[in-house]
Image (cartoon, helix red, strand yellow):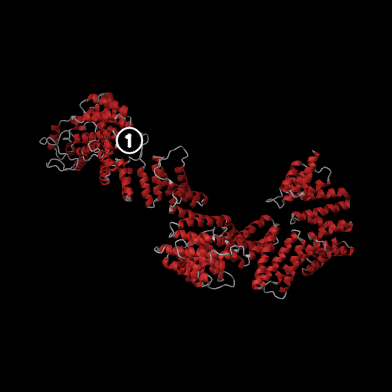
Amino acid sequence: MASYAHPDSAHDLLDLDINTLRQFIGLFPADGLSKVLTGYLSSGISKYPLSAGTPDAPDLSEGGVALTQDVPVSQEDCLVMMTEGILESKSSTLAHCLLGDYYLSLEEYESAVETTRKGLKLAAAEVKKTGLSFQRIRDALNSTLATALIYYQPPRNHSEAKDIFRGILKRQPQFTSALIGIGLILVEEEEYVEAIDFLEKALEQDPSNGRIGAEVAWCQALSGNYETGLSGLQKYMEYPQMDASKPRGRELRAQTLHRVGVCMWELDPSKAARKSRQGAYARFLASIKANPNYAPPYTMLGIFYEDYSKDQKRARQCFQKAFELSPSEILAAERLAKSFANEGEWEIVEVVSQRVVDSGKAKPVPGSKKRGVSWPYSALGVVQMNKQEYQKSIVSFLAALRISPDDYHSYVGLGESYHNSGRYNSAARAFNYAETPTDGVQMKKSGESWFTKYMLANVHRELSEFNDAIIGYEEVLREKPKEFGVSIALLQTLVEKAWHSIERGYFGEAVDSANKAINVAIGIAEYKPGAFNLWKAVGDAAAIFTWVQEKLLSFPSEAIQSLLRQNFNDEDYNSQSGLDGIGAAQLESLVSDNTDDTQSILPKALHASILAQKRAIVSCAGDTHAQAVAWYNLGWTEYRAHVCLEQEPEQQGLTTYLRASMKCFKRAIELEAGNSEFWNSLGVITTTINPRVAQHAFVRSLHLNERSVRVWTNLGALYLLQGDQELAHQAFSRAQSNDPDYALAWVGEGIIALLYGDANEALSHFTHAFELSESSSLLTKRQYAVSNFDHLISSSTATSSITALIQPLFALQQLTFQLPYDIPHKHLGALFLERVGNHEAAIKALTSICETAEQDYETSESASALARYAQGKTDLARNLLATSSYASAVEEAETAMDLLQDFETDSSTLSLEALAKTKLSARLTAGLAHYYLGDFDASIPYFRTSLSETSSNPDIICLLAEVLWAKGGEQERDIAREQLFAAIENSGRHIGVVTLLGAMAVMDNDVDTMEAVREDLDALRTDKSLSLHQLARVEKVCDAIGFCLGGVSEEVNEARRSVMLTPWKHHGWQGLATVVEDGSFAAIMAKKTARRSVPPHGELGAVGLAKAYAGTSVVGDAQRAILLAPWEKEGWIALAEGVKGA
């Protein structure tokens, strides 16, 4: 508010004759200037009244009514009359001067500035027109303008105001108004010492002016010298300017009494002094009596009543009055806002805060030393958060923090707004900065800070940073041990972490989180056993174990049983046992002696999950929406029990758990028919039972949420099961357009491609689905692995490299971890392990498969179990052969052949093609095992039988030839040669036949055969389809033939020829390095080309690369060779020779 040390009015400065003004008004009452003069003289600003007959003009400052007919009836009427007059006398400089001064008295500084600027332009025009200076009216206008500029948008206009005052002082150094004006500017800038100097100079010019003296005393008080300021203010209270009989005197007296009270308040801050009604309190009350429209004393009285008299009602009334009178009373507004906030009156808080913001007093003006206040913006932010207007609340809190960067609660509010609007990273930064500022800011904290840590943990939870979230919740719970909201958030986060771990394939971590969640739930149940979210989370935690069945032994049966019995009788569970037959008996059986059998634990985990979901239904009996959600949760749990326990080929139709699931979803729909997820669930349940009902449910769900990718995919699956591939394709395509990253839609398209016979397209879809899917998706892994294996065994272009097999193998290993009793896919995984060379793991898996199949056959005596057992034995024998366990391989292979004889007359279980392949594998395994055991006579019959059944397969011919040659008899060797020559005639240049025939010719030194074979070998050397291993065999035989036919020189030529044919491959360089005298260059080239042949550029393995390094005879390369393949002797030999040579 403007200081009442403002100089005399413009009328006083102009020193106009009052009688002349009255005569002008009497002669020209309708003139615009007369109206301005009438309103001005009636307002109480001038020291002269309008009428000479009434020496004291009525005080209209409080909206009173005059009894005379020649004055306006109220202060508002004065303003209306003056504004009407100014419109009629737009060219009157005097009218603008008086109206500007009136605006200044009303604290309408913007209007005062505009009006006086117009007046100065008119005065300048008159000066130019008449040649007269009109200095007095120009000084009056400039004084009013500069004084208004002090308070209009401070301190931006202070420099202009100073320039105006200094311009006046150059002509009139003792111009009191200018001295006062500069002093007031310095007061606004809080330069109190300099302000005192200027005001004292003004006081020297007019020692009897109590207004100036009171301002000097107040500046002394503001500078910290309250005692001197108090004595000065009390002295000037007796000056005539403080005469309460005059309007301006009353205003100045009220201001001075308030300032006296403030000085007394600050001089003695003791509670007794401030509580005394004879001290500052009396001065504030006297100030209000002097001028009931002066706001500051109301604020101080409000503080008195609130802090010392403990009268909240009167305090609020005082604050309301102060704020109604002036929006500049920031302290009153703050106390008022806090009072309404404590009572939850947020609409009033918004009104108060918005008015402070609109007043412009909250934000500091650039360049001003005055600090702004941040609480109005913070309060607006809180109100906007309650209205869920989070974008607005973010703007409000940011504005508050620009004013007060150390406002802890504004940072918390900003973080909460970011969190609620989904901007979690920004929320995390806000909460982290509130707790640990990085730039040395000391936060102003009041009260507990656990809520910030709780909200930060919520942010981490939303960002899937579950470990940080759990740490945050646990830290809060150490401060607030039984804070239910935090405890349930921790429980839900642990469950969410478990699901997230399953989706990422971290199954052990998922089980650990589920166990920890159950332990947390036990603690919550001790003091809040009736919470719906508690039992929902317990049910989910128990269900986690059904998704990671390899870890079922970790299921805490006793803890779950104890938890379910917390504040609940066993018999109460029987109230819903009619739904699925699960009640108190199943609760009792959760703990039994048979705890080592995972198959017996699976039903317990499912029963525990179902019982927990039933408990959740009981916990929310009075909440319809929660009831609907609880029935929905129970429905999926029942369906999970159906999938795990009932979904077998021989158990088709409406089983117990499937029926229960359907009833649950129907109940949920009855309670909340507008939920699309409920209809989708009903459609899933009824897909195999009643397709019409399923289709209706899916269509209803899509009506409620047309963009649901899951519903479109489920609808496609329904059409697929009904044999309508075209509609299924349309549904899957719609799902893909809604969400291209939804894996199951791609699986559906892959199945359609399979039905149309396009295996390559199907594999492409399954591969893409596997790349998109989460680890929890079983169908995606199954289809991807099976399709990959089918492609591997059916396509001639398929590669068997580890890089191509690692993904399907990884998928099957995850599948085995989730469903250890899924025998078909476990068997498939063993076949993949065999192909990547991990025979030990394959043997372990196949042994388990055989044991399971044997137990199944002993129980059911089914042909399918026997076939599975025979196939497992065959594959087991083959892997035992690969690990050099020849005796065991023979035993397992012969067992398999014995078992397979039962299927020769029955092709219903095993097709003729599958039976032939299985028997061939068993015979070849037995033959090779006998061969490696040295029992050649026993091996030959197996090969001959295999040869006859495969129509002289060249690979089997090679095996038989090797066995016959190894036997050593001339007759056997002749038969071997004959078989190989016959194979060449039938199969052409078969790599195995040609190299074996060449090797035999070298051993027999048969020149004719060597020359004949050499032509075929040269052709094979340029065959790009050969693998590195096959090419090495060819090169080795070529080198041997060259040596036999031409000695060392021809051997060198063969090596050179090999390099020329394939200079980018290391085999030729390695061969050249071994046959020339100085092979160092060739060895280095072999090393370089070998390095370029390793994955992903080639297929060279660690052994091949190690041999290339070992061939350089360099100690460093020998060490690298050992590092690459420490089991190979070449690296060690090279290292020994290198060290010895050094």
Q: Quadrant of residue 728?
A: bottom right
481 relative to 266 in the view: left or right: right
Disc count in the image? Answer: 1
In the visual, does 530 lie left or right of 964?
Answer: left
Q: Does residue 696 show up?
A: no
Taking 747 as reference, is 975 left or right? right
Identify which residue is drawn at 55% across, 55% down: 512
Position of residue 142 measured from the top left corner of the image (x, y, whole percent): 26, 31
Q: Position of residue 1068 (x, y in %)?
A: 78, 49
**Three-letter amino acid code of the residue under disc 1:** Pro
In this figure, which residue is indicated by the disc labeled 1? Answer: 154
Q: Nearer the viewer, residue 518 or 247?
A: 518
- How far across and how far down the image is residue 571, in percent? 46, 68
**In front of the other: 459 or 1065:** 459
Tell me the element at label 1.
loop
Which image quarter holds the C terminus? top right
Above-or-below relation of 1138 to 930:
above
Of residue 279 and residue 868, the one placed in the foreground of this image is: 279
**Residue at the image position 75 percent from the left and 56 percent from the top:** 1026
* Label 1: few (<14), some (14–19) or many (≥20) C-alpha neighbours in 10 Å: many
- x 79%, y 41%: residue: 1138
Q: Is residue 255 visible?
A: yes
Q: Is residue 888 left or right of residue 543?
A: right
Q: Residue furthest bottom?
A: 905
Which image quadrant: the N terminus? top left
Residue 615 percent location from the top left of the image: 46, 63
Q: Residue furthest front?
A: 593
Position of 634 relative to 293 (above/below): below
